[in-house]
Amino acid sequence: MGFPGMKDAKIDTVLAHAGRRPLANHGIVNPPVYHASTVLYPTLEALEASDHAPFDTVNYGRIGTPTSFAFEEAVAELEGGYRAVTAASGLAAIATALMAFTKTGDHVLITDSAYGPTRRFANDTLTRYGVEVEYFDPLIGGGIAGLIRPNTTLVFVESPGSLTFEMQDIPAIAAAAKAAGARVVMDNTWATPLFYQPLRHGVDVSLHAATKYIVGHSDAMLGVLVCTEEVYTTVKKAAVGIGTCAGPDDVYLGLRGLRTMKVRLKQHQESGLLLADWLSRRPEVARIIHPARPDHSGHALWQRDFTGACGLFSALLHPVPKAALSAMFNGFELFGIGYSWGGFESLILPVRPAAIRTATRWTEPGPLIRLHAGLEDPDDLIRDLERAFARLAAAL
């Protein structure tokens, strides 16, 4: 760590210092960016010693460099993990976790509210290799024990859920899985390590699409898996075995983003709640889906386990013709229409959960809109939304 008291330091201090070793780098504040493939050894004995502990030394560029070690150390420290593993993207981190704990003949349980690409990888790849994939109601809680079989090796959770933001009772699910010998992996991208720490609630691996809030500037692809000591080697071997690794410049941008994550998340949270409150009073809006609001069905779980919220939430509109929805979207000045989230810019996107759900049903008749509150002034964002609703009304 950066100084001996890091273990007892508060989150702001950890964000500023974790993963930094200035005295090992000529006094330079930020860890340098190592572009590396080949690593040279002074003797045969040094080469052989490195091969005996490849995850603990700079052995080969793909396995790790001082840049990736610094990032992994910082994120693991933030989330209370043993060690972390970097990946080329959030999806690469998800794929690594799913492959680390499965083999032919195994059964996995995945929340029905999982990120769409998680489902695609499970359905298109895991099943081709003889892994049985089953989806479960995200509200099942401890009742998941009834779905666990003797060959269930993994339970994959995401809370809040993608698009529809269901809150899961992670401690109850983890307890049931652990009692049956299954591992638990959680996609913790929404909360970040600042607002939820899954490993403290029974989860084995907490993964992030670091592309989003950790990087924070929409200019890098990066994933990271934070592991308990018990499973770290399993996850790292899986990552090395399939060749997943993150580019050094993207890792560096992840490290840079970490340093300002708390101050950014404070604004994302405040703006998100302001926009949600304003939207809740609009006649065009049927319902706001935001776990930090008291009217959310999972608010009590959010309040019990989480310490904050990010800027991502959904708004359900009353039914409107497609032409009116297009008129609403075609003209935004501040809200971008695009995938991903977690950057400094605000985003808006129509989403269709009904198209991917299998264990549960999404039957709402109106359009569901996902919004990400960026770092712009909320008043300006509200004016952009006001003009959008005016366009929608004019098209009816």
Image: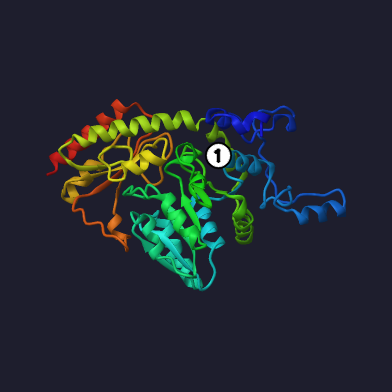
Here the colouring is rainbow
Q: Closest to the observer: 346 or 297?
A: 297
Q: Residue at x 52, y 43 (%)?
A: 220
Q: Position of residue 59 (x, y in %)?
A: 74, 51
Q: Position of residue 194 (x, y in %)?
A: 48, 36
State which quarter of the image contains the C terminus.
Answer: top left
Q: Residue at x 42, y 55 (%)?
A: 173
Compared across the picture, whether 359 is left or right of 8 comes to left
Residue carrying label 1: 254
- Residue most toward the front? 179
Q: Closest to the observer: 260 or 390?
A: 260
Is 122 above or below relative to 298?
A: below
Q: Residue at x 64, y 31 (%)?
A: 30
Compared across the picture, whether 50 is left or right of 125 comes to right
Looking at the image, how many numbered discs can be counted on the residues?
1
Q: Position of residue 349 (x, y in %)?
A: 31, 45
What is the crowding at mark 1: few (fewer than 14 residues within 10 Å), some, or many (at least 20)?
many
